[in-house]
DNA sequence: GCCACCCGAGAGAACGTTTTCAGCAGTGCC
DNA sequence: GGCACTGCTGAAAACGTTCTCTCGGGTGGC
C-alpha cells in the first residue's frame, strides 16, 4: 500500500451519472440573470423581494444545491468552510473525544471536518496533511507524530491556519492546545509516594513522543522532589501503539526488585497493564495509576485510579485557536495548557505490598 | 445554535493572506504551456522525459500543490476524491471503530474522509448530509437516525454514491452494511435461558431506532422459541444516548418481580447498567449480557459477557460497497450482514439467584 | 519523393461560481 | 428640465484546472 495520496487520486473509474442543477439553470427557469441567482443564494439583501422569491422557488424546483468548491475557487477569501484533523488513530477513545470537541466548535460555524489517522507514521501524517492542503482546507489541527512538521510552512504561507493538539509541532512555530502532561505525571507519582510507595515503575510509549517524554519527565521530577532516585530498571518503553505493554508489565512485575506501584502513561498501555496485573492475580497488591481515563475504570475491583485529561476540551481549545486565526488574529503563537485531575478509585491507593 | 450549514458558511472573516502557486506559474517558470504542466501533474506519459523533468523541478521550486477542488470542477467524472461519514457520535467507541474501518479502505484509494456526528437528531443529520453534498463528496456513508432519508435521492441522482451502515435507510433504497442484530440478541437470550434464567430483562434504546428494534425483536423471538412469555414489565427503553440507563436499571432491579438476568442492547447502556448493578452490589448475583464489546470488559469481576459485533468490519464493508458503486457497479442494492459472536466472560454465566 | 500517420505540445474553451463594472430606471433637488 | 444620486439588475471576467482541437514535425510505406 502506498503512503501517498496521488494528487487527488480518483475514487474509482466510474463517471458520474447525472449532474447537479447549476445557477445557470436556476437563472433560466426564474427568468433572471446568473448574477441575481448568486446574490439570492448568498443572501444579498440588494435583490428585490419578488425576484428573490422567484429564484428561491426555481432553485427548490430544480433541487439546486450550492457548489462550495466552485464558490471557494472564485471567492476572494478562498475559504472552503472545511478543516482537517489528523490524529494518531480516530478509533482511540482519547483522540475520538478530541475529534468530537473539534467538530462541536466547527459545526457552529458551518464548517465540516475531515478526519484522518496517522498511526504515528510520519510519512502517513505528511501524506494526509498534503492531501488536505490539496483539498483546500481552511485550517488543520494535527496531533503530530514525533518528527518534523516544517513541511507545513508552505501551506501556512498559502493561508492555511495551523494548530497542534496534544503535542506541539516540531521545527515550526504554531498555536497548540496541550494537556499538562508533566504536571499530571507528577500528581500521579506524588500520590503513590504519599501512599508509601518507594519502588514505582514507569510504563510509557517511546520517549521521543512528546506526551510520553513529558510524562516521563514529570515522573522523574516527582521522584526527585521526594528525594527518591529514579529506578532505571523499572522504566520501560513499549512499542508504538502499546502492542507489547502486556509483556513489559509482566517483565517488570516478575523481574528482580519488582515495583510496588506502577504508573502507566497512556490509555492503551494502562489497559494492557491492568490486564497483565489481573492475569497475574496481583490487582489487589500492586498499585496502579494510569494517565487518561478509561470507560469502566470505576467498575474494576479495585477501581482504576487515573489522571484524567479533558480530551473534548483539548479539541475545543484547539478549534478555538484555529478559528481565532481564521478570524484574523495575527499575534505570536499561543499555547493553551489544560489541567489534569486525579481521580482516585482504589488501585492507586493500595499500600505497598511484598516488602520482603 | 442553528442546525443548518448555511450554504458553505465561512470559517471566519479573515481573508487568506497568500495564495498558492498555480499551474500557470509553474508553466511560466518551466517555459512550457499550461497544458503540459497539467499533463505532467496527472502523470500523462505522452509528455517527453526532458520536459516532464523541467516541470517537476519548477513545481518543486514553487512549492506547487495540486488544487483538487478546481480539478474536480473541470474534470469529466467530477470526482473530488473525498467521501462523507455521518454517525451518531464519532466519540462513541463503536462508531469511531466504524469510521476507522471506512478510513482504512478509503486511504488505499487516496480518498479523504469527512466525519460528522448527528447525535440522532434528524435535522442535524440532514444538515450534515446536505453540507457534504455541497462539498461535492463522491459518496456518503451514513448511520441514519430513525427518520426519513429520501432527501438524499436528489444527491444520488447527481451521482453521489450512498451506503448505509449499522442501520438501513428509510424511504430510500440503497446498499447497506449491517450487523446481525436480531441474531445476536437471540444468541444472548438463548445463552441466558440455557443458564437457567426465566426472568430476563431488556434494556434498550428507543425502539424506533433500527438496531434497538431489531435487538428487541431478537430478544422476543428467543424467548418465544423457548416457550417463555416476554415479561413486558422487564422491558425498558432509555432516552437517546443512554442518559438514563442507570436509573432504568435500578427501576428494574428494585422493582416487583425483578429479573435474574439483564440483556442490555447497546454499549453505553451496558456501561450504565453495569455501573448501577455494581453500585447495588449485585454484580455477582444478577446475570448480564451486553450487545457490543467494551474495553476492560474482561477485567471486571465477573468479566462482562457480550455479543461482539465487528465494528471496523462494518465500516470496511460499507466502504467496499461504496467504492464498488463508484467503480461503476449498477446492480440492485445489496445488503451485507455481518455475524456477531458471543464472548463469555462470567457475567452472562451467573446462575439465577434470589428465586424466593 | 509523397502521403498517411502518429506523437508531442500548445491554444482555448469549459466547469460553476463570485465579483467588478456598467446600465437603467426612478427620485429628489435646484 | 437637467443633474447627481440611489437601488436594482445584467454582462462579462476571473478563479485553477481539464480536455478537446489543432498543428508541426518526424517516420514508415510504397
Image (tube, coloured by chain):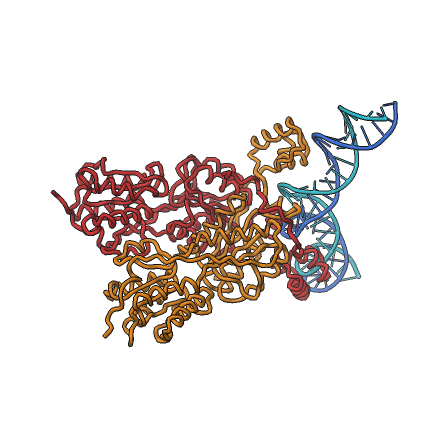
Chain colours: A orange, B red, C cyan, D blue
Q: Image point 37% across, 58% down: which residue?
A: A342
B167 sits to left or right of B33: left
Q: Image point 27% across, 38% down: which residue?
A: B236
Percent coordinates x, y for residue A102 in the rendering: 49, 50
Task: Tell me which corner region of the image, top left, top right, bottom left or bottom right, holds residue A30.
Answer: top right
B252 sits to left or right of A139: left
Task: Tell me which corner region of the image, top left, top right, bottom left or bottom right, holds residue B193.
Answer: top left
Percent coordinates x, y for residue A346 in the rendering: 28, 59
Percent coordinates x, y for residue B57 in the rendering: 66, 65
- With respect to residue A337, does B199 lie above or below? above
Q: Which of these two is toward me, A114 or B297?
A: B297
- With respect to residue A106, does B298 lie above or below? below
Q: Image point 21% across, 45% down: which residue?
A: B261
Residue sitting farthest toward the left:
B356
On the rendered image, what quadrant is the C terminus of chain B found in? top left
Is residue A211 something that shows in the picture?
yes
- With respect to residue D9, does B115 lie above or below? below
Q: Which of these two is toward me, B39 or B30?
A: B30
Task: Tell me which corner region of the image, top left, top right, bottom left or bottom right, holds residue A303.
Answer: bottom left
- With respect to residue A244, does B139 lie above or below? above
Total number of numbered discs in the rendering = 0
Is residue A136 something that shows in the picture?
no
Q: Which of these two is toward me, B212 or A254?
A: A254
Percent coordinates x, y for residue C28 in the rendering: 78, 25
Amino acid at each position: 500500500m502506498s503512503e501517498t495520496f496521488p494528487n487527488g487520486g480518483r475514487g474509482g473509474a466510474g463517471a458520474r451519472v447525472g449532474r447537479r442543477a447549476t445557477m445557470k439553470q436556476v437563472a433560466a427557469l426564474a427568468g433572471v440573470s446568473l448574477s441575481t441567482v448568486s446574490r439570492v443564494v448568498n443572501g444579498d439583501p440588494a435583490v428585490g423581494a419578488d425576484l428573490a422569491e422567484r429564484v428561491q422557488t426555481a432553485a427548490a424546483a430544480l433541487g439546486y444545491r450550492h457548489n462550495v468548491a466552485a464558490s471557494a475557487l472564485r471567492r476572494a477569501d478562498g475559504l472552503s468552510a472545511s478543516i482537517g484533523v489528523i490524529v494518531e488513530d480516530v478509533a482511540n477513545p482519547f483522540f475520538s473525544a478530541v475529534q468530537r470537541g473539534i467538530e462541536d466548535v466547527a459545526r457552529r460555524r458551518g464548517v465540516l471536518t475531515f478526519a484522518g489517522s496517522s498511526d504515528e507514521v510520519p510519512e502517513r501524517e505528511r501524506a494526509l496533511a498534503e492531501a488536505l492542503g490539496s483539498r483546500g482546507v481552511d485550517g488543520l489541527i494535527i496531533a503530530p507524530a514525533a518528527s518534523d512538521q516544517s513541511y507545513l510552512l508552505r501551506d501556512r504561507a498559502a493561508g492555511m491556519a495551523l494548530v497542534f493538539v496534544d503535542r506541539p509541532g516540531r521545527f515550526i512555530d504554531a498555536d497548540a492546545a496541550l494537556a499538562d502532561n508533566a504536571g499530571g505525571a507528577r500528581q500521579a507519582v506524588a500520590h503513590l509516594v504519599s501512599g508509601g510507595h518507594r519502588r514505582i515503575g514507569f510504563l510509557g510509549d517511546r520517549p521521543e513522543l512528546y506526551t510520553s517524554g513529558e510524562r516521563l519527565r514529570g515522573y522523574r521530577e516527582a521522584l526527585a522532589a521526594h528525594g527518591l532516585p529514579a529506578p532505571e530498571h523499572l522504566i520501560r518503553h513499549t512499542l508504538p501503539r502499546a502492542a507489547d505493554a502486556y509483556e513489559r508489565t509482566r517483565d517488570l512485575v516478575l523481574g528482580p526488585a519488582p515495583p510496588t506501584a506502577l504508573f502507566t502513561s497512556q490509555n492503551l498501555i494502562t489497559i494492557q497493564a491492568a490486564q497483565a496485573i489481573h492475569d497475574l492475580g496481583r490487582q489487589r497488591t500492586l498499585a496502579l495509576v494510569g494517565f487518561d481515563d478509561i470507560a469502566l475504570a470505576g467498575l474494576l475491583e479495585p477501581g482504576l485510579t487515573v489522571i484524567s485529561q479533558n480530551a473534548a476540551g483539548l479539541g475545543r481549545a484547539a478549534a478555538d485557536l484555529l478559528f481565532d486565526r481564521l478570524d484574523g488574529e495575527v499575534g505570536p503563537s499561543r499555547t493553551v495548557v489544560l489541567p489534569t485531575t486525579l481521580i482516585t478509585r482504589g488501585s492507586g491507593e493500595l499500600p505497598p505490598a511484598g516488602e520482603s
